Amino acid sequence: QVQLVESGGGLVQPGGSLRLSCVASGSTISINAINAMGWYRQAPGKERELVASISRAGNPNYVDSVKGRFTISRDNAKNTLYLQMNSLKPEDTAVYLCNAVVLWTTYWGQGTQVTVSS
Protein backbone atom coordinates (compact mmCIF):
# COMPACT_ATOMS: atom_id res chain seq x y z
CA GLN A 1 0.00 0.00 0.00
CA VAL A 2 1.16 3.49 -0.88
CA GLN A 3 -0.46 6.69 0.33
CA LEU A 4 -0.06 9.89 -1.68
CA VAL A 5 -0.70 13.36 -0.31
CA GLU A 6 -0.61 16.41 -2.55
CA SER A 7 -0.07 20.01 -1.47
CA GLY A 8 0.76 23.38 -2.95
CA GLY A 9 -2.43 24.25 -4.78
CA GLY A 10 -4.20 27.57 -4.46
CA LEU A 11 -5.46 30.66 -6.22
CA VAL A 12 -3.04 32.42 -8.56
CA GLN A 13 -3.35 35.14 -11.16
CA PRO A 14 -2.74 34.38 -14.85
CA GLY A 15 0.98 34.36 -15.54
CA GLY A 16 1.75 33.29 -11.99
CA SER A 17 3.48 30.20 -10.67
CA LEU A 18 2.77 27.39 -8.24
CA ARG A 19 4.74 24.37 -7.10
CA LEU A 20 2.85 21.23 -6.29
CA SER A 21 4.26 18.46 -4.11
CA CYS A 22 3.16 14.87 -3.64
CA VAL A 23 4.60 12.87 -0.76
CA ALA A 24 4.43 9.10 -0.87
CA SER A 25 4.32 7.00 2.27
CA GLY A 26 3.86 3.33 3.07
CA SER A 27 5.91 0.26 3.65
CA THR A 28 9.58 0.38 2.69
CA ILE A 29 9.05 -2.41 0.18
CA SER A 30 6.18 -0.57 -1.52
CA ILE A 31 7.97 2.78 -1.58
CA ASN A 32 11.08 1.22 -3.09
CA ALA A 33 8.91 -0.45 -5.73
CA ILE A 34 7.41 2.80 -7.02
CA ASN A 35 8.12 3.03 -10.73
CA ALA A 36 6.56 5.80 -12.80
CA MET A 37 4.79 8.73 -11.16
CA GLY A 38 2.60 11.34 -12.72
CA TRP A 39 0.43 14.38 -12.37
CA TYR A 40 -3.11 14.39 -13.71
CA ARG A 41 -5.75 17.08 -13.63
CA GLN A 42 -9.50 17.14 -13.79
CA ALA A 43 -11.55 20.24 -14.48
CA PRO A 44 -15.30 20.40 -13.82
CA GLY A 45 -17.22 18.59 -16.52
CA LYS A 46 -14.07 17.29 -18.16
CA GLU A 47 -12.27 13.99 -18.18
CA ARG A 48 -9.14 13.44 -16.15
CA GLU A 49 -6.07 14.10 -18.28
CA LEU A 50 -2.41 13.30 -17.88
CA VAL A 51 -0.34 16.46 -17.44
CA ALA A 52 3.13 15.01 -16.96
CA SER A 53 4.80 11.78 -15.98
CA ILE A 54 8.27 10.79 -14.93
CA SER A 55 10.06 7.46 -14.82
CA ARG A 56 11.98 6.24 -11.80
CA ALA A 57 15.16 7.24 -13.64
CA GLY A 58 13.83 10.76 -14.05
CA ASN A 59 12.78 10.82 -17.69
CA PRO A 60 9.84 13.23 -18.10
CA ASN A 61 6.95 13.42 -20.51
CA TYR A 62 4.45 16.26 -20.89
CA VAL A 63 1.14 16.89 -22.55
CA ASP A 64 1.59 19.44 -25.35
CA SER A 65 -0.45 22.11 -23.62
CA VAL A 66 2.03 22.43 -20.73
CA LYS A 67 5.34 21.93 -22.51
CA GLY A 68 7.70 24.78 -21.77
CA ARG A 69 5.61 25.94 -18.79
CA PHE A 70 5.52 22.96 -16.39
CA THR A 71 8.39 20.92 -15.03
CA ILE A 72 7.96 17.56 -13.32
CA SER A 73 10.64 16.21 -11.02
CA ARG A 74 11.02 13.67 -8.25
CA ASP A 75 13.26 13.19 -5.26
CA ASN A 76 13.38 9.47 -4.62
CA ALA A 77 15.27 9.97 -1.36
CA LYS A 78 12.40 12.10 -0.04
CA ASN A 79 9.66 10.02 -1.71
CA THR A 80 8.35 13.24 -3.22
CA LEU A 81 7.06 14.21 -6.63
CA TYR A 82 6.95 17.85 -7.74
CA LEU A 83 5.27 19.88 -10.44
CA GLN A 84 6.59 23.38 -11.03
CA MET A 85 3.96 25.33 -12.93
CA ASN A 86 4.88 28.65 -14.53
CA SER A 87 3.00 31.03 -16.83
CA LEU A 88 -0.28 29.65 -15.56
CA LYS A 89 -3.40 30.17 -17.64
CA PRO A 90 -7.08 30.10 -16.67
CA GLU A 91 -7.44 26.86 -18.59
CA ASP A 92 -5.00 25.24 -16.16
CA THR A 93 -7.67 25.49 -13.47
CA ALA A 94 -8.42 22.00 -12.18
CA VAL A 95 -7.91 19.55 -9.36
CA TYR A 96 -4.41 18.17 -9.71
CA LEU A 97 -3.80 14.59 -8.62
CA CYS A 98 -0.62 12.60 -8.42
CA ASN A 99 -0.31 8.90 -9.00
CA ALA A 100 2.29 6.25 -8.51
CA VAL A 101 2.68 2.91 -10.23
CA VAL A 102 3.79 0.02 -8.06
CA LEU A 103 4.09 -3.23 -10.00
CA TRP A 104 0.52 -3.81 -11.29
CA THR A 105 -1.20 -1.26 -9.06
CA THR A 106 -1.74 2.46 -9.52
CA TYR A 107 -2.24 4.59 -6.42
CA TRP A 108 -3.86 8.01 -6.37
CA GLY A 109 -3.80 10.98 -4.07
CA GLN A 110 -6.86 13.01 -3.15
CA GLY A 111 -5.85 16.02 -5.23
CA THR A 112 -5.15 19.69 -4.71
CA GLN A 113 -7.15 22.52 -6.26
CA VAL A 114 -5.42 24.95 -8.60
CA THR A 115 -7.40 28.01 -9.63
CA VAL A 116 -6.00 30.51 -12.11
CA SER A 117 -8.06 33.67 -12.13
CA SER A 118 -7.71 37.42 -11.95
Image (spheres, grey):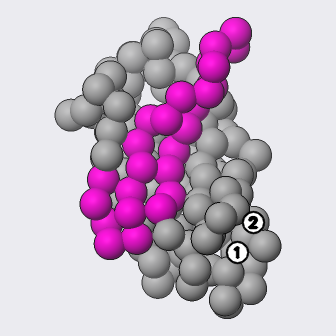
For the question of whether residue 5 can be seen, the reply is: no
Q: Is residue 79 left or right of residue 106?
A: left
Q: Please, what secondary structure does the residue beneath circle 1 have?
A: strand
Who's the residue at 69% across and 13% down the image?
Answer: 44
Q: Please, what secondary structure does the residue beneath circle 2 have?
A: strand
Dot 2 corresponds to which residue?
3
Dot 1 corresponds to which residue?
25
Q: Are marks 2 and 1 in contact (CB under 8 Å)?
A: yes
Q: Which of the marked residues, 2 or 1, is nearer the chain's N terminus? A: 2
Pick the residue in front: 58 or 113. 58
Q: Where, by quadrant of the figure, is residue 69 drawn?
A: top left
Q: Is residue 59 left or right of residue 52?
A: left
Pick the residue in front: 7 or 108. 108
Who's the residue at 51% across and 44% down the image?
Answer: 39
Point out the image quarter for the N terminus. bottom right
In the displayed structure, 22 sits above or below 12; it is: below
Mark 2 vs mark 1, CA separation in Å: 5 Å
Rendered image: mark on residue 76:
none
Residue 39 part of the magenta segment: yes
Per the rendered image, the range of residues in magenta is 36-60
Who's the residue at 61% across and 71% down the image?
Answer: 103
Who's the residue at 41% across and 43% down the image?
Answer: 52
In the displayed structure, 28 sits above or below 3; it is: below
Q: Is residue 68 left or right of residue 54?
A: left
